[in-house]
Image: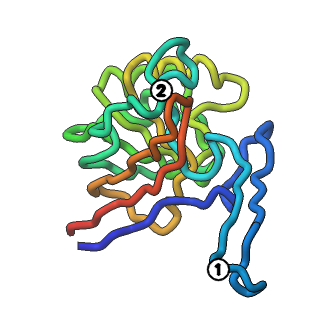
Amino acid sequence: MKLIDISRSIVDAPKYPTAPETVITQVDKIAEGKDSNFSLVSTNTHAGTHADAYCHFVQDDKTIDSMPLELYYGKCRVLSFPEHAILSQKDFEGKLDGVKRVAIHGGNYTYLDVTAAEYLVSCGICCLLTDGWSPAPLDNEKEIHRTLLLGRVAIVENVELGHVEDGDYELIAFPVNYGSFDGAPVRAVLVDNR
């Protein structure tokens, strides 16, 4: 068994263009005579590797603390696609048999179109991971997110897949219980039992 960390930090991950910068301030330092090291973090709920709650684009839907945890655990297929591509239904046809979770490795800037999002929902995908900051291009964030989230597909964004071969793994990617918010950080891991 091999554990493969596919998480990115809140500092080093690609940042959504309109998101604020993450700022970490070390308040106490042992090196300066304090009893402990203690830091403050100012960030947003969608920094680094993170999960979107259904309510991120759907009014009055589940917040991150009420997302079903089983969505983020189980067999997951990693699929590679060309960089800077817009994926359609045809790109996924014949590639999703026997899997409910899929991770898109597209070099950080590969996105879905509406047909792809609808197809993932129709195939019963329950969790979509992407190495991009979003599964959708900037000009169609709302429709694609809503298609997935209303279709009960959990979304995990900003994973690191550059060191992962295509194939089937076990996914463990539970979001932090931030309470009644629209998203939260995730420590995403793939388990390779091959």
Q: Amino acid at mark 2?
A: Thr
Q: Amino acid at mark 1?
A: Asp
Would you name the residue on which mark 2 appears? 63
Q: From the top left corner, tell me how far across and down residue 189 is, in percent.
A: 39, 60
Q: Secondary structure at mark 1?
A: loop
The correct choice, above or below, for 94 with respect to 193 in the image is above
Cα separation, mark 1 vs mark 2, equals 37 Å
Left or right of 62? Residue 39 is: right
Which of these two is toward me, 159 or 98?
A: 159
Left or right of 87? Residue 32 is: right
The correct choice, above or below, for 129 with respect to 58 in the image is below
Q: From the top left corner, tell me how far across and down residue 100 is, in percent.
A: 27, 37
Would you name the residue on which mark 1 appears? 35
Residue at 32% in and 49% down: 77
Q: Secondary structure at mark 2?
A: loop
Q: Crowdedness of circle 2 by 10 Å Cα count: few (<14), some, many (20+)?
A: many
Asked if one can make out residue 151 in the rendered structure from this viewpoint, the answer is: yes
Q: Crowdedness of circle 1 by 10 Å Cα count: few (<14), some, many (20+)?
A: few
